[in-house]
Image (tube, grey):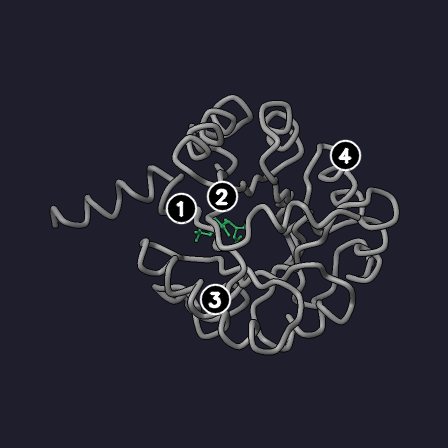
Amino acid sequence: MSDDALDAVRGQLIVSCQAAEGEPLRGPVHMSAMALTVLAGGASGLRLEGPDDVAAVRALTTAPIIGLWKITGAPVYITPTLAAVRAVAEAGADIVAVDGTGRERPDGSTFADVVDVVHREYGRLVMADVATLEEGVAAAAAGADVISTTLSGYTGGPVPAGPDLDLVSQLAAALEVPVVAEGRIGSPEEVAEALRRGAWAVVVGGAITRPAQITASFVAGTR
Ligand SMILES: CC(=O)N[C@H](C=O)[C@@H](O)[C@H](O)[C@H](O)COP(=O)(O)O
């Protein structure tokens, strides 16, 4: 298994290019253009949703791709089944991101099963998307190659306004594996702070690639 993808993003910005079902930018045509655009801006890696987007962008770049597949219907929705894991790996993701919260997966698979499939069948890496320190420690013990703070704020209660940089600090202090800062990072200053706190890399999504969200933040200034 190669750690090249992780080496290539060390200390760097990864940009998440995602559009949800029903959004005008949904689909590989627009997301490919978005991906090439953020690479032109200096992003060192990409986070992409759905096998179609991953495959389309894989054909265009050798930049590291973190792939996931959001399948709604259960609390665990980030690459929630082994079939989804295989589809994302087969589409060409270097790193497969999956829910790493320890909650029940809809197909009954375990996180260790995911690690086994991704490592043994595909020779790729596994990113555990977690919400807490305990989940990150458990996912690393179960074989995750990299832990991301993706799900902090999304597993119960109100979603906070800013990123969970304290979780970045806690995970970085506790773990040997790389820790990625992700979720609600909204400024270059927050990127720098996440790296200071020990993040291996920083993922920014909506603040760069969700124009409706960005527009709404400006519209708020008219009220
Ligand atoms: C919670 C969840 O499902 N997060 C998703 C995971 O891939 C995406 O919707 C986020 O855009 C991504 O994590 C980047 O975060 P932000 O867009 O806040 O910079």
- Front: mark 3 or 2: 2
Which comes before the other along the chain, label 3 or label 2? 2
Q: Secondary structure at mark 3?
A: loop
Q: Secondary structure at mark 4?
A: helix
Which comes before the other along the chain, label 1 or label 4? 4
Q: Are marks 1 and 2 in contact (CB under 8 Å)?
A: yes
Please state which amino acid type lies under the numbered disc 2.
Ser
* Residue 133, picture quadrant: bottom right
Query: Measured from the top left, where is residue 19 in percent x and y?
Result: 48, 36
Q: Are marks 4 and 3 in contact (CB under 8 Å)?
A: no
Distance between the alpha carbons at the discs numbered 1 and 2: 8 Å
Q: Secondary structure at mark 1?
A: helix
Label number found at residue 16: 2
Q: Are marks 1 and 4 in contact (CB under 8 Å)?
A: no
Which comes before the other along the chain, label 2 or label 4? 2
Please state which amino acid type lies under the numbered disc 4.
Glu
Q: Report the label total.
A: 4
Residue in the foreground of this view, choosing between 1 and 114 = 1
Residue in the foreground of this view, choosing between 142 and 178 = 178
Check disc 4 and report the residue beneath it.
90
Q: Is mark 3 within 8 Å of ligand 1?
A: yes
Report crowding for label 3: few under 14, some 14 to 19, many 20 or more residues within 10 A (C-alpha): many
Check disc 1 and report the residue beneath it.
206
Query: Measured from the top left, where is residue 149 in percent x and y?
Result: 54, 63
Query: Measured from the top left, where is residue 73 in percent x and y?
Result: 64, 50
Residue 19 in the image: above or below residue 160 = above
Report crowding for label 4: few under 14, some 14 to 19, many 20 or more residues within 10 A (C-alpha): some
Q: Is mark 2 within 8 Å of ligand 1?
A: yes
- Name the residue located 82 percent from the left edge and 50 percent from the top edge: 119
Check disc 3 and report the residue beneath it.
153
Distance between the alpha carbons at the discs numbered 4 and 3: 30 Å
Distance between the alpha carbons at the discs numbered 1 and 3: 15 Å
